[in-house]
Amino acid sequence: MSAFVCLAGSAVAQSSADRVFPGSVTEAAPRSVSEITLEAGQLVTLTTASVDGLDTILTLVGPDGQTLAENDDREPGILTSQIIHMATTSGRYMAVVTGYGGATGDYELTVRDGVDFGLSWESSVIQEQVMSLNARRTSERFPVDLSADDILVTTTFALTEDLDTTLTLLDDAGTVLAQNDDRGDGSLNSQLVFQPDAAGRFFVEVGTYGGSGTGDLMLSLALDPNADVPFDFTTIEREPFARHEGTLDNRQSEYTFEIDLAAGQTLLAVADATSGDLDPVLRLVGADGYPVALNDDRGDGSLNSAIAFTAPQAGRYTLELQRYRSGESSGEFVLELSHVDASVVDTLQGLLENRVTLSGPELTIETEDFRVHYTLEGVDASSTAYAQSVGEALQEMLDVQVSRIGWAEPIRDDDGRYRAYVADADGSMGVTYPVQIVFDNVNTTDVHEASAARTVFVIDNDFVGMGKEAPVHALMRATATHEFNHVVQFGYDSEEGLDWLYEATASWTETTTVGGDQDATDYVATDFDAPEICWTTSESGFDYSQWTLLQSMADSYGEGIVVDIWENSVELDGFETLAATLETVGTTIPDVIQRWRAQNFALAYDLAPLFNSTVRVHHTLDSERGWMAKGGLEQLGANYITVGLDGRYQFSLRGDDGLELLALAQNGDEVLVIPLGRGGSVDTRAYEHVALMVFNRTMPEAPGVCSDVGYSIDVAPAGGALAAPAYSFSAEHFTPPT
């Protein structure tokens, strides 16, 4: 389930020239092999598909028996595999398919000549060729003659690893009409979609980022009448009155501009990145200090921003230009300010409003509070019965989340409903998009939100290919409550700096609302397998898996504390959001994280029998030689060290001042937590199982800004007083970790 990112994936449409090899991965035959014959210079795309949802790993082996390429997931969240390879020698190659983690099932391997660029059936290829770029040939231009009805799709595919390609489209006079660096599918490949205003000759220029890349690539020039043409902001009639250029980076992360507007005057601000990987964000703030317009991605397929705002009364406004806060993008920009007709406000809103389009005729089902959009045709196809069940599940989740848990009601569409789509979620179980920043949620009368947003969201139509064993109806219910919780979250704050909170809260909500249909326990292993990683890390999957932290807090302070965190997010940001919440219950972030890390060891959760992992043990102390960790323990992370000694021992910790030592000891039906500080004594003979937890209390500088430290533990026989337990957990589900 993805809160913000809809992964772009192109379908591999089968043609008569494709070679299809059916196969099976079984326990008896975990390696399924297909032989294919290739000629030197032949470029092929190998893709797996599985109706069983088999999570495949695809390996290509050359005629000499050497592994040439391997792929697990073709894109993030898509469990099938894909390899694109250009043969250097003629001969018989082997395509080997195995199941990730020992998974079994049936699959089909499709071998297609060339590269699948995701074009529709009605497309026609103008030119496809392999080309090389080097120090002498840093770019190359290709002429293209287009009529006014043509839609040109230009795509690169790098054949050399790490080659970062760029595309530029110019008219006959050399004016730049469009540019693209990365197409947005997680690769460094590029794509431009363009429809001219009039017939003419145009030029496609292929280069590399920074102009210094070298290697081979495949270039495709095609006409595709079904391609989505990005909105062209240059077509908006305007009266420019200011233009600014500059650079956003670590040294200069924000610019502000004062703008005077007359009553009824409409401002258009357009920010374009002209170099680097800059992701600009625009915010317009009124004289009272509250924002009145905000945009990150403007809806034309780029990362650029644009806002249009009609001033209700004369006044001075402040325009803020920043880079997207979740990352360190940088580069040069051009900001143009213009006066435009008030209708441009609706034009720009329409680009965001229509984020989801279905592959067939659109049908709707209405419940009291939801409008569910679905289709019976194409890749998004579902059924009326399925769409009805989605509506019923959402109606139930609204009641549970708002009435029982106590969330504030989120922001509705103008028709008074929430808008949901049943569609192929491109490898995710669901996705939620903010489509309008309304700033103040009218459903909260006691607070003025600064960045509340209205949303639309998608629930996958079939959950095929995700490697999930649960029934479709259960997955749908888990996704319905997860995505609707994102809708709820956006009613508080669409720009919370503690962005860990979004997925962690939605995953925790599954466990509190849909019972056995929850899917969150599948995520736990990510954090349990790497407990040394910093809390709030930006590494993929940890925000989902760390829903157990919210459960740990709820166990101590009640479910309402999770709602309290989001209520504080309205006026606070980042670590302050959580710190202020915990202050009201007399604790701190490091103390809560420490307790959570100990609770994870004890598996002291009602849902622990469904967890797919225990916390990872980093070492076993079985002698008095002690142990040294040279690094790897990040802020608010933990190392678990099993104690294999029998007797009374003093354990001493040396290292960074933020480190502390705890003993975790199973004593019958409970797991005791024994603080040792920088050192203390434990009699291991008194317990069934003993481990040490080295905890790094140091706070990161900011969410996701993580670094690591090392330490050493000294061990010696002890004769003094023993350290006393501070608290304990139930050992009902405890399993000694390995």
Image (cartoon, rainbow, N blue to C red):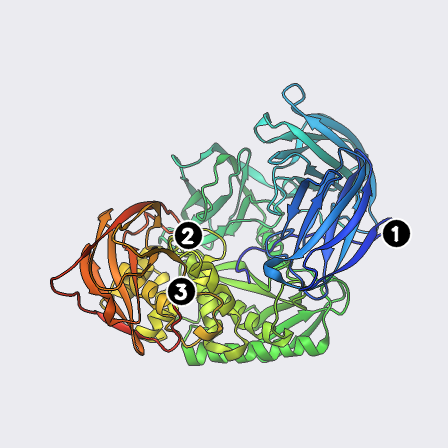
Say which residue label 1 marks.
16
Between discs 3 and 2, the one toward the N terminus? 2
Whole-Å distance between the Cαs marked 2 and 1? Answer: 47 Å
The front one of 699 and 678 is: 678
Whole-Å distance between the Cαs marked 3 and 2? Answer: 23 Å
Name which quarter of the figure residue 670 lies in: bottom left
Q: Residue furthest top?
A: 136
Tell me if 631 is positioned left or right of 400 in this view: left
Question: In what element is the residue under mark 2?
Answer: loop
Tell me if 693 is positioned left or right of 204 in this view: left
Question: In what element is the residue under mark 1?
Answer: loop
Q: Residue at x 61, y 46 (%)?
A: 184
Q: Is residue 446 visible?
A: no
Give the foreground label among 1 and 3: 3
Q: Which mark is residue 537?
A: 2
Q: Amino acid at mark 1?
A: Ser
Whole-Å distance between the Cαs marked 1 and 3? Answer: 53 Å
| Residue 504: image location, x then y, percent | 44, 63
Between discs 1 and 3, the one toward the N terminus? 1
Say which residue label 3 marks.
737
Q: Quadrant of the N terminus?
A: bottom right
The front one of 682 and 339 is: 682
Between discs 2 and 1, the one toward the N terminus? 1
Q: Amino acid at mark 2?
A: Thr
